[in-house]
Amino acid sequence: MSDNEVVVKSGRKIAMGSDWWDIRDNGETVRYVDVVTEARHHHGVFYLSLGSAFIDANNAGVVDIAARLRMDIGTAQQLRQLLSDMIDQALKPVDRDKAN
């Protein structure tokens, strides 16, 4: 599997409490993001916008908005925990004793 392969596709399901909801993929292009362009909250809604930076020869840099996310505090907390776990895992040193 390549690093850019989409692994969550239409036809799969996700647990929502005691129910299973269908996942529907509308075919949005996967975008690499490297700039946070908005991060704020208002009345319990968290606003997060991400951008893709482009630098082309002698031209001025440009940031294209790649995603605008709005979420409640519960989803924001889940995202924070998920990212924290992923970062911890990525920074964990390789255990050479368990290598093949």
Image (cartoon, helix red, strand yellow):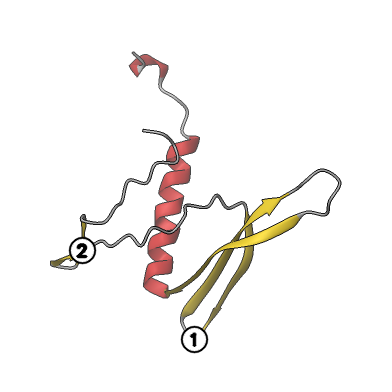
Secondary structure category for the residue under label 2: strand
Residue 43 circle label: 1
Identify the image quadrant of residue 100. top left
Residue 49 placement (x, y as % from top left)? 57, 67
| Residue that sits furthest to the bottom in the current view | 43
Nearest the camera: 37 or 26?
26
Q: CA distance from mark 1 to mark 2?
A: 30 Å
| Residue type pointed to by label 1 | His
Callout 2 crowding tier (Cα within 10 Å): few <14, some 14–19, many ≥20: few
Residue closest to the eye, 1 or 27: 27
Q: Residue at x 49, y 86 (%)?
A: 43
Label number found at residue 22: 2
How far across and how far down the image is residue 91, in percent?
A: 50, 36
Residue extending farthest front? 27
Amino acid at the residue labelled 2: Asp
Circle number at residue 85: none
Q: Closer to the camera, 57 or 20? A: 57
Q: Position of residue 13 (x, y in %)?
A: 20, 58
Q: Earlier in the sequence, mark 1 or mark 2?
A: 2
